[in-house]
Amino acid sequence: MPWLSRTRLRAAGAVLAAALIGGAFAVPAAQAESPGGPLTDLVNPFIGSRNDGNTYPGAAVPFGMVQLSPDTGHATGYSYDDDHIRGFGAVHLSGVGCGLGGDLPVLPTTGDITETDYAKYAAGYGHDDESARPGYYRVGLTSYGGITAELTATARTGRQRYTFPATDKANVLLNAGQSLHRTVSTRVEVLDSRTIRTAITGRGFCQDTEPYTVYTITRFDRPFASYGTWDGDKVTAGSTESTATGRHGAYARFDTRKDRTVEATTALSYVDAAGAAANLRAEGGGSFDRARAAADAAWERRLGLVRAQGGDTTLRRTFYSSLYRSFLAPNIGSDVDGRYTGWDRRTHRAKGFTYYQNWSLWDTYRTQAQLLALLAPQESRDMALSVLRIGKESGWLPKWGYGTVETNIMTGDPVTPFLTNAYQQGLLRGHEEEAYAALKKNADGVPPAGSPALGREANAQYLKDGFAPYIKGRPHTKPGDSDFDHGASATLEYALSDAMLAQMARDLGHGGDADRYAARAQNYRKIFDGSTGFFRARDAMGIFTGPADPAKSEGFHEGTSWQYQWLVPQDLPGVLRLIGGKAKAEERLDAFFAYRKLLQDPEKTAREVWVNGPYDYYNADKYNPQNEPDLIAPYTYLSTGHPWKTTDVVHAALTLFTDAPTGMTGNDDLGTMSAWMVLSSIGVFPVQPGAGTWGLSTPVFDRVELTLDRRYYPAGHLTVTAPGTSAAHRYVQSVRLDGACHDRTYLTTDELRSSRELAFTVGTEPSGWGTGDHAAPPPVGTSSAAQQQSGRQR
C-alpha cells in the first residue's frame, strides 16, 4: 500500500479496533497483570469437542503413551453433542480427521450383562455432571443406577476410579473387539482374581493400513466377585481366556454393597505382554489421587514454561488450552526398559533417548515442531532421533506414522522440513550426517514396491521434468494418499523440502548436493501458468490440466491454487515477481483475505468469508484458516512491505479460537492449530518451516516470559513485551532486541537462542517499521542464501 493511502486506512482501522475491543483480544487495564493460581485452572479440555475439532477431553500427561478418554460414538472419539458414553478408550490423538485409536474402551455398568455391543450398552450422561482439567476427567453416568467415573494417567498407564451404587452386580466391561478403527483380532485372558490382559490387533486410518498390536494389562485394587468373557453375543461366565476376530471382551464383577469404589490401572505396551506388565509395575503404584496430583503437577510444569501477563479471561483460557494441546503429541512409544517395536516389526531398544511415535508430519512440520523445539527441546531431540530410527529400521523415513506402522496419509515430503528444523534448532548434534544421509536418500529416491512407505511417490517424474504430474484415476499401489492425485501441491511441497535440504547440505559442506537441491527448490516455477498467473497442475505430458479458474483448480491436496500460491516460503520474492511484483501481489493478498471486509468486521469475515466448514477445502478463492496449507499465508505481507496487514489478519484469525467446545478452527491435527494460536499470540512465528526464521507480528499479551532449556538456549529465557497492546493499539511502531533497534520483520534461531528480551512498542496506526528493502525474511535454500547461513555454531 502506498504511504499516502494510510490516511484512508485509519478510518477502516478504527472500525476494526471497535470490532475487536471487548472480544478475546481486548486488554482491560484492570486485568493487565496475570492473576495468580495454577495455570492448569485455565485449561479447558473440552475446546474443540464440537463441530469436528476432534479433540478429546480425557486424561493424559505430556506426550504420554496413554490418553484415557470417553468415546461417545463420534468417528474420532468424543463429541460434545452426544449423550451416551460407550467406554473410556486408552488411546486417542488430538484432532485427527479419521477414526484412530479408542483401543480397549472400558465401561462400568450394573446388573446382568445382556449386551456386548458398546453402542447398545452405552451409558447416558450430561454435561452438568461432567468436568475435565489437565490429567483428570470426571463424569456422572446416569445409566445403571448412577455411577461416577474418574480418570487420570501416567506416561504408560491409565487410572480409573468408579463409584457404583450399592449392588452385588457392579461390572467393569473391557471391550477388546471394538475401537475407533477396525479391529482385526483380539485375545483376552483373566490372569488371576484381580488382573485381565489383552492383545489387540487393529488397522485403518482414513484408509486401510498395515496392522499393529497393542498389549494391555489391567489390575484392579481388589479381587473380583466373578468374571467372564464374551465372543459376539455369547457371554461365558467363568471363562479365563478367549481369542476372536469380532466383538470380544472380558468383564469383572464386584460387590459394592459395602465398598462402593473400584479402582483399576491399565498399562499399555506396543512390544509385548511382558512390556505392559513392566510398565504396570513401574507406574501403577500408589493411589488414584496421588497419580492425579502427579499428572496435574506435570502439566503445571509444562504450562509454567510460558508466563503470559495481560489479556482477559477468555484470551488466557484459550491461550493456555492451546498450549496444553500442543504438548499432547507425539507420544512415548517405548516401554520403561527402552524396548519398542520398530517399523520393521522387530523389537529394538532405545538407549540414551526415549522413543516416540505418532507422526502427523504434513501438519506438525509447520508449527508444532517449532514450538516444541523452543519449549521442549530435549523431547524434540528424542522425537527427531525416533524419526531417524524409523528410517534406519524400515528403510525409509515416515510420512504419517501411527503407532508402529506407516499410514501414508497426506502427500508431499513433510519429513524433510521436520528434520531440517530439528537440525536448525540444534537438536541433532552428533547426528547431523546420519540425518543428512537419511534425508538425501528420501529426497533422491522412491521406496520400492515391497516397502509400505510411499515417500516421494512422484519423485522419478519430478527429478526428470521438474514437477510431479497430476494423473487422474491412477490406480493406487499402496494404502494411503497418492502424490499423483495431488501433483501440483506435491510439486510445491517437494520444492520447499529441497530448499531446506539445500541449506542443511551447504552447512555440512556438501556443496555439490546443496547446488543440486537449490536448483530443485526453484521447481515451483515449473507449474506456474503465465496465462492465469497462478500455479496449476500438469499432466504426465506436461500439459496444464484441470479448470483454468484458480478457485476450481485440481491437483492440490485440501486446497486450491489460490491457497497454495503462498506456499513457497523458501523464495517469496521470486513468487511475488512471478505474480507481477509487490503491488500486484498486494492486491491479490487483499482479495484473498477479503481485507476491506476484514477491517470493517474481522470476526464476521473470519467466520463467514474465510471459514466454510472443517472439511470444505475446495472451490474457494479465500484464506482457509482451518487448514495447514494456509497457516503461513498471513505472514506473506511481511514480504510486501506491509507488515501491519499481517497483524490485522493474524488477530482476526485468532478470534476463531475461543474457550468454548466450538473454539477450535478445523481439526487440531496433533497440536498443529493449537501451536499456530500460541505462536501467533506471542508474536513470533516460523515463517519458513525447516529453516531458522521467525516472523514477527504484534503480540496479544503485554508480557510473555518463556523459560528455555539452557542446553539449547544459553540465555535461559526470553521475554516478549508489548505494553498496552490491544485491538486499538495493535500496530508495531518499533522493535528492540536486547535494547538494540531491530528493523527486520523476522528473527533467526540464533537470535532467539542468544537474546533475552524482544520488546515491541505499539500504537494506533501503522508505522514505517519493517518496510525497508531488507526487512523481509530472505530466501533460503538458494546458493547465496545458504552461504549466508552457513558456518553457524550448533
Image (cartoon, rainbow, N blue to C red):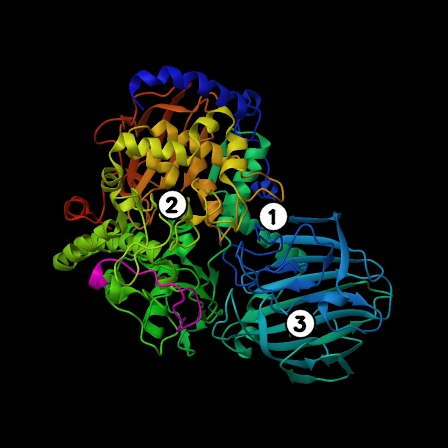
Which one is in front, 555 or 35? 555
> What is the spatial separation of the Cα atoms under label 1 and label 3, in whole angstroms?
36 Å
Which one is in front, 317 or 589? 589
Return the x and y of residue 332 as percentages of the image width and height.
Answer: 48, 63
Horizontal placement of 298 versus 736: left or right?
right
Which residue is under mark 3?
219
Q: Residue furthest left?
A: 512
Sooner in the amino-acid sequence: mark 1 or mark 2: 1
Sooner in the amino-acid sequence: mark 3 or mark 2: 3
Q: Quadrant of residue 4?
A: top left
Q: Quadrant of the N terminus?
A: top left
Which residue is under mark 2?
549
Sooner in the amino-acid sequence: mark 1 or mark 3: 1
**Which residue is drawn at the image coordinates 59% and 69% (left, top)?**
267
Mark 3: which amino acid?
Arg
> What is the spatial separation of the Cα atoms under label 3 and label 2, in whole angstroms?
61 Å
